[in-house]
Amino acid sequence: MSARDNILARIRAAQGKPAVAGAAAREAVHAHLAARAASPRPHAAGNPVAEFRARALALASTLDEVNALNDVPRAAAAFLERNTLPLAGVCWREFADLDWAAAGVKVEARAARDGDLVGITGAFCAIAETGTLMLVSGPHTPATASLLPETHIALVRAHRIVTGMEDAWRLLRAELPSMPRAVSFISGPSRTADIEQTVTLGAHGPYRAHIIVIANGQ
């Protein structure tokens, strides 16, 4: 973060501004964003969860829905067993206390390392219009858990599914005191068509993206 701060401070100095933006400057930016007229947007479906499901499936993600957070370990175990995948992985710290052992899954709350095959994360929110997950990095939400393992399982609370990209950024600005170091948008498994225009999954990240939507997640 210090390198970024140094770069931004140099830019601000070249503009004749203080090295750190004050409260008045930040408020002016927020006021400008709030006053800006919204660009034209596609017609939104009536049910964001249903729209998100349809778009995510179209992007080659798989998706399950559960009633509560405590149901997640069983749903994750069922997905791993169906696909003959290891019943072990890493997860974000907020999910470490779920009863993974009862579901037969061994989970460690830490950043992913080379050799970890399953990563379990949450999502800051999800975007119905595109079937996309929005993740933000932080001390307890390491980006490696969604990027390094071959299989990414993402937990999404239904009330955190927003209509469009504009809504996702609006939510981030409203809830986070400052911009995180990294904001990741995940739309299905990693893929590329660079070689002979043939789509290949897992080229730059997970081969599989499995989403568990939690109906009553808080």
Image (cartoon, rainbow, N blue to C red):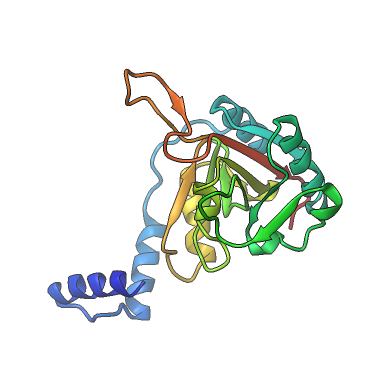
Figure check: 151 above or below 144: above
User: Residue 160, how many percent across, how many down?
Assistant: 63, 50
Side of 89 where 181 appears, left or right:
left
> 117 and 162: which one is in front?
117
**Residue at 76% over, 45% down:** 215
- Residue extending furthest right? 102
* Figure quadrant of residue 57: top right
**Residue at 24% over, 80% down:** 19
Figure check: 133 above or below 56: below
Q: Quadrant of the N terminus?
A: bottom left
User: Residue 95, how many percent across, how many down?
Assistant: 71, 59
Side of 86 where 132 appears, left or right:
left
> 92 and 107: which one is in front?
107
Side of 101 where 91 appears, left or right:
left
* Figure quadrant of residue 79: top right
**Residue at 69% over, 41% down:** 86
User: Residue 91, how many percent across, how many down?
Assistant: 64, 56
Q: How many tags in the picture?
A: 0
User: Residue 182, how many percent across, how many down?
Assistant: 42, 58
Side of 49 where 70 appears, left or right:
right
Q: Quadrant of the C terminus?
A: bottom right
> 179 and 96: which one is in front?
96
Figure check: 193 above or below 26: above
> 64 and 199: which one is in front?
199
- Residue extending furthest front? 115
